Image (cartoon, rainbow, N blue to C red):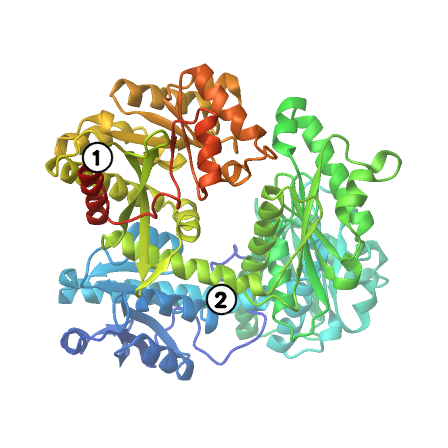
Amino acid sequence: MSGNAPPGGDRMFDFRPEPVDREGAPSSAPLTVLSVDDDPAFQQSLRLALSDFRFDDSPLRLLTASSAAEAEELLARTPDVSAILLDVVMESDDAGLRLVRSVREHLGNAEVRIVLVTGQPGMAPMKQTLQQLDISDYWLKTDLYRERLQGIVTGTLRTWREIRALGRAKRGLQQIVQAGRQLAGLHDLGEFSGHMLHELAELLEVPPDGVVCVRTERRDAPLSSARVVGAAGRFAGLRTRPLEDIDDPQIRGLLLEALGTRASIETPTGQVLFFDGGELAPQAAVYLATRRLLDEEERELLRVFATHANAGLVNVDLAARLDQVAYCDALLGIPNGNALQRELERMLAMPVPRGCGLLVVDLDQYIHSSLALGPEQGDLLLERMAGRLRQLYPPPCMVARLHEGTFAVLGPSASLVTDPVAELEQGEDDHALPFLGVDAARVDLDAYRGAASGAVATGLLLLRRARAGGHHEVAEYRAEGEAENRARFLESRALYRAVREGRIHIALQPQVCLEDGRIVGAEVLARWSEGGVPVPPARFIPIAEASGLIVPLGRQVIEQACQALQAMERAGFPDIPLSVNVSPLQLRRREFDEELVELVARYRIEPRRLELEITEGAVMSDYQAGREMLARLRRLGFPLAVDDFGTGYSSLRYVHSLPVSRLKLDRHFTAEIDEEGAGNSVADMIIALGRRLGLDVVAEGVETQAQARWLQRHGCPCAQGYLYAWPEPLDAFLLRLRGQGRSG
């Protein structure tokens, strides 16, 4: 018998037989759905709505849990749950979302489908939640009438069934996908072919030593290029050898004929199955020594098997190509970030001690150099970097490119002791990397506790911190840093709640005239207490800036400053101005000037009474845009001061071109002042600079009479500091102003 094999099927070949129904066949086994909700009424209505529901003739088993914790325990005991209907808000605002992460990460269940339901719109934004979490859908409870609910469950179960089927196939291919870091196609195909040979032998109850699999790499390649990619029994030694090396001329001829005629062949002693990969994969042929003719039922079984095996061969070929794309850097031909992540996950799953580490290496200024020298030079630098790293850290270390000029090395800790900063910058002969600095960070995976993605992120964070601090050495991971990061995260959450609930308050620190001691203004300072304990501004202001909370926090401070100015005017002090700090994030917002105008108009405050303090860095990070914003603010009537002057860029040309009216001498320079003159040169220079530019100067951090006398003698008109007053609430500041009036 000779004829064409049927086209590829729509189901991937299963590597191992499983005692389950064939895909798509009806089943009477119930499917399990878990409803997690702390609302008994909703649970009851859900049970009624699904009481007569069936999915492809299968009944539904509905389990319920009233909390995320109860659901997690139930899921651990019941792994066959197909879908979860999950409330977002239960014992906490994010209990549902935390359960999703627990199901995926802690329980490792990637197949169960999750539908979020909520009665509180906005608790979990739909678009962001769908993007960040592996969930199938998101619905409001008010939209879940009976028909829609049954439709959602039907679609969810259908998706679960498809994912489960793909999951079973993927588990069969897992060993192939993970074989070898170079992701070579032949090796992966050989693993798949070995499974297929044994499945064929079992299907037709013949010895597996009568089976061999061959294929060509290209459709237009000559038949002589065919190679054995899977073999068993007496043919086992032929794997990876040319087809011409098969010493049985009859079998060799049958395989060549099948490949040449693109047809399956049957003989009284054997079968040759031809697999046409179509446009997606090369062709293949399998010889099966049956030693007998097959009956009609066996032929039908063989045709069905061939259909699925053909699809499986196409899939495994595609998987190898996708694996190459997904896990190999296209430019350098080395593992990429995905490959590193996969290997990290495998390594972190091992018990401690692992004796392994992660090294992250970055070419400083790579992007700028590529722009200046051209992309070809940039590619050359990357190639040299990769080559040098592979010399410094040979196998079993894995060298991977994460992105742009950032690389990572994963391997035994003993192999990572070589300092990459010194070696890469100095190098030998032409192996050095000219004109570029190198930064590096090392993470001991025995000390690290966390996920694989977190290990890479930790290394990158260490790099950024080292670079920001000006360090030029390998930054080492400290386990206690995790506790610090956790504390900062918790503080950022608490600060967010404080800003949202309006619990940020202001304090005023007087600014006095050094000639007569009278109060001529005050600086507005943000204050926050959590649980009755004040949080130092030096701690929460950087957190606010890093998280973006500085924008709403700053708006609240400015609004409270306007309220204070209004109260001061009513109390009879309309000429005392207040100054507020403006962060770079606030200044970069195009609508910032409009918001200021709206606030002063609402409280009927003249702009001249609200001074805006900016740092040099706030303007210099984007000089042109910052200068334009400051010019608009000055035209609107707001006075401008440069805060902490002398600690930033300190460019006279830039400062002279900015529309500012006052310089603030940083407390660091004030602290260096003594009456003998030692260490006073910077303060004297800034005061003189202010006079020459026609700018007022106020000295911050004045704490001693000696400092005040020196500042007055050298022409500084104004000062603030603990010598005169600590920051105080508005009521105390008003009492101070009234007392000044009575004493005057």
Q: Nearer the viewer, residue 578 or 229?
A: 578
- Secondary element under disc 1, as helix, strand or loop, is loop
State how far apart marks 2 and 1 are (Cα).
85 Å
Furthest-left residue in this view:
570
Q: Is 1 left or right of 149, judged from the image as shown?
A: right
Q: Is 398 left or right of 115, judged from the image as shown?
A: right
Furthest-bottom residue in this view:
77
Q: Position of residue 682 (x, y in %)?
A: 56, 29
Does residue 149 lie above or below 372 as drawn?
Answer: below
**Residue wearing tag 2:** 167
Q: Position of residue 744 (x, y in %)?
A: 21, 35
Bin the neighbour count of mark 1 within 10 Å (Cα to Cα): few under 14, some 14-19, many 20 and up.
few
**Residue wearing tag 1:** 744
- Secondary element under disc 2, as helix, strand or loop, is helix
Bin the neighbour count of mark 2 within 10 Å (Cα to Cα): few under 14, some 14-19, many 20 and up.
some
Residue at the image point whose x is 41% and y is 44% from the top: 545
| Closer to viewer: mark 2 or mark 1 | 1
Residue at the image point whose x is 38% and y is 22% from the top: 660
Does residue 219 lie above or below 624 as drawn?
Answer: below
Does residue 514 lie above or below 221 as drawn?
Answer: above
Q: Is 335 left or right of 704, judged from the image as shown?
A: right
Does residue 251 lie above or below 683 as drawn?
Answer: below
